[in-house]
Amino acid sequence: MTKFSELNLNPKVLKAIDEAGYETPTPIQAGAIPPALEGRDVLGIAQTGTGKTASFTLPMLSILARGRARARMPRSLVLCPTRELAAQVAENFDTYSKHLKLTKALLIGGVSFKEQEQIIDKGVDVLIATPGRLLDHFERGKLILSDVKVMVVDEADRMLDMGFIPDIERIFGLVPFTRQTLFFSATMASEIERITNTFLSNPARIEVARQATASETIEQGVVMFKGSRRDREASEKRKVLRMMIDNEGDRCTNAIIFCNRKTDVDIVAKSLKKYGYDAAPIHGDLDQSQRTRTLDSFRAGDLKFLVASDVAARGLDVPAVSHVFNFDVPGHAEDYVHRIGRTGRAGRAGKAMMICTPRDEKNLEDIEKLLQKDIPRLDNPLKSAGPAETTDEASEETDKKESTRRRRPAKSDAAPAKENRAQESQPEKAAEKSAEQAPEKPARNDQDTSGNKPARKRGGGGQGGNRDNGKAEPGMGDHLPSFIALSFEERMAS
């Protein structure tokens, strides 16, 4: 079996490796380090958690051990898709360069430009950056990339998912054509293949595992879940998650819980804390300082449950994560591999469980197709607890709705009452209006001459009554034209 001492690394780097407690390189390290030390381009394809970071960190340090950095002109460049992954790479450089006089700079969002510019102005050997922040510094005229001798693209497939490929292509155009390129990815999509064909020169291809495979040390399972009612599905799903955690007992020493949306990350973290679980959220909308504190707390073991979006699926190097819970089925099958790769690292055993709703079954099929095997189905803990049981959160929601309905008058009762009141008042208002607007009419021959107000005959006076019997013509009112009221003989005579 190959040892690090046989890989022709710099003696000071070997000393740091030995102090870190490593003796034997992983397959990707054993395959990538020798051609990298020879100055060749390297295309490394390996599943997450196999030690890809050390595959480029160790040879880069050995190459950079000779030489000196100049102001604003870094000698090497490492591109990472997320702040967390960039911070992890920086930690690796600190670990393995402790006996070398090399400098580094970390360019990520959420940190002051001024502080980063001060470090760059002094000159750095290793520049670790996310694509967006790197281009920001370049466009401000604070960074010159013409002296980059080694360029690394880490987690290239994640770069593709996050839309960084145009930025990567632009950065390739800013660095020297004669640079050495080390390119690492867990999967090889067609777009990634195109970039490697364009920007890598006769690379040594190191593929230590079938593309996008999960580690065999990870026990997987999925719970097929369907809510009892649509308005209760979310709360019942959170209860299923809590019951899955409880069923693991002491075996679950810590866990990462993945959600597809940032809003769900906050909701799930808040729900877990409400029920007494030590949980905290992490996603891209949080301040960098808060994300860093949360991650440090999780790594130190002070935080047991980390609720995360896919920003944490790559680059979280916490060696002893016992469980990964996928609260949502990821939309891309490759993301599932990266998520569960946070457990079962470095040969340890791990467990990954997922909750799948009916609308997620197509995504589950894609994952199983990628893995080329079925994920074992687990019993729904909510069903085993009894079909009549409802979640506490669902009960609270139902109670609130019932209370609201009791306070609000029923529409079916209130509407008829209102309509009846309107119908009752309408004739009265019409009569009053008609009485006010009716013009004064001349006295009829049959009226009382005593000065008292004559009593109106039914059917009204004026020209609206019948001349023979004093009855009004059916359907006619006071506006009846006089010629219509004439009898047949009178109309013929006229």
Image: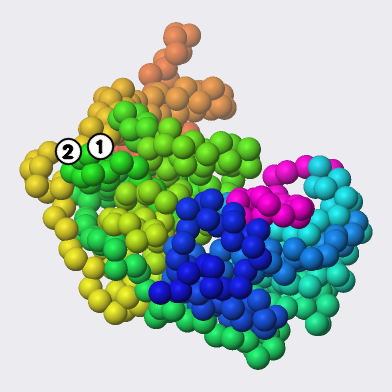
Cβ atoms under marks 1 and 2 closer than 8 Å: yes
Q: Where residue 65 appears, x then y in whole percent?
A: 75, 63
The image shows residue 303, relative to residue 354, as above or below, that is: above
The image shows residue 395, relative to residue 226, as above or below, that is: above
Q: Which mark is residue 390?
A: 2
| Distance between the alpha carbons at the discs numbered 1 and 2 | 7 Å
At label 1, the amino acid type is: Ala
Q: Residue at x 78, y 42 (%)?
A: 112
At label 2, the amino acid type is: Thr
Q: Residue at x 10, y 42 (%)?
A: 385
- Name the side, left or right, on which 199 lies relative to 115: left
Residue 49 lies within the magenta run: no
Secondary structure under tag 2 reads loop
Q: Where residue 6 appears, x then y in whole percent?
A: 53, 73
The residue that disc 1 covers is 394
Q: Where residue 449 appears, x then y in whole percent?
A: 46, 13
Q: Which residues are magenta?
A: 90-114
Q: Where residue 158 appears, x then y in whole percent?
A: 55, 67
Which of the colour schemes (rainbow, by chain, secondary structure, one colour) is used? rainbow
Res. 395 in view? yes
Q: How many numbered circles does the render carry?
A: 2
Res. 489 in view? no
Judge by depth and name the residue closer to the eye, 19 or 138.
Answer: 19
Q: Residue at x 69, y 77 (%)?
A: 181
- Name the side, left or right, on which 174 lies relative to 286: right
